[in-house]
Image: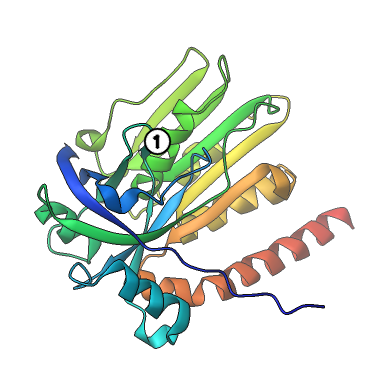
Amino acid sequence: MAEQKPRKRTVHTGTVESTERLSPHMVRIVLGGEGLDRFDTDGHTDHYVKLFFPGTEDLSTTDLEHTLNHGPRSQWPTTRTYTVRHWDRQKRLLTIDFVTHGDTGLAGPWAEAARPGHTLHFTGPGGAYSPSPEADWHLLAGDESALPAIAAALEGLPRGATAHVYIEVAGPEEEQALATGEGVHLHWLHRGDGVVGSALVPAVRALDFPAGRVHAFVHGEANAVRDLRRLLRIEHALPKEWLSVSGYWRLGRNEDTWQSTKSEWNRGVENEEQAALAATAG
């Protein structure tokens, strides 16, 4: 068998075209420019890109690609993962929505300070979920980190689709206007001073699941996502192929730490799930 060649990583460079504050803790950045000439998506609503921070804006695309494709991982720049909120292929404009918390983190402060003409390097896109037209209904659930992907999914729902949507944010000031058809039941959940997931998990658990095949998208904080995955897989016995479930982040961990332990965490969740399913079958 021929040895598989490592995947070549293509670096794109976006130039800030505009910025917009959507809510107290979310900023929209629209990127354009010739550096997006090689970028494209295939229409999935959960597409994501890997943004490079900090101090990489002065590096050339060629230098970054060489480091990513030939250098040791220890030399790779720090990355943060963000959803593609919208890609306008005709105008070649990429929209990314950033959750911000003042000076905390890397990407958030960059987005707060971004102005037209600033540049940002990234790779991607990844992602493979889109609402299936074969589903009888859809479940979309997550915290503010999943809001851009849920918003994109709502815009990508088949015409006339039924969807139950649960979005947890800090308070009403963080709500946004989203695309909602007649069959979309949108629930904004306000956690206030509660821990992330404290409003989301019980709300989804209280849903009286409609009959028929559900296509579920559940993303956000890892602990809350784990609890909802158990609900879907074990209590409702939903097949994995009809679920898009993943922890975007985990309380108490930055992205570097979370990404380095995510595979192990997922294996633990999978093992617990298999044990519970076996016990139920027995």
Residue for point 58% across, 47% down: 128
Q: Quadrant of the N terminus?
A: bottom right
Looking at the image, residue 179 lies above or below residue 247: above
In the shown orientation, is residue 118 left or right of residue 67?
A: left
Please tell me which residue lies in front, 279 or 20.
20
Task: Where is residue 24? Give x, y as percent.
Answer: 15, 42
Name the outermost residue toward the right.
282
Image-quadrant location for residue 53: bottom left
Q: Could you tell me if residue 143 is visible in this image? A: yes
- Give the percent coordinates (x, y) of residue 221: 43, 57
- Give whichever of 248, 115 is nearer the camera: 115
Quadrant containing the C terminus in the rendered view: bottom right
| Residue 12 percent across, percent down from the top left | 34, 58
Measured as percent of width and height from the top left, residue 189 is found at 36, 36
Identify the residue at horizontal 38%, vertical 38% (top origin). 87
Task: Residue type at mark 1: give it.
Answer: Arg
The residue where tag 1 is placed is: 89
Q: Is residue 183 left or right of residue 197?
A: right
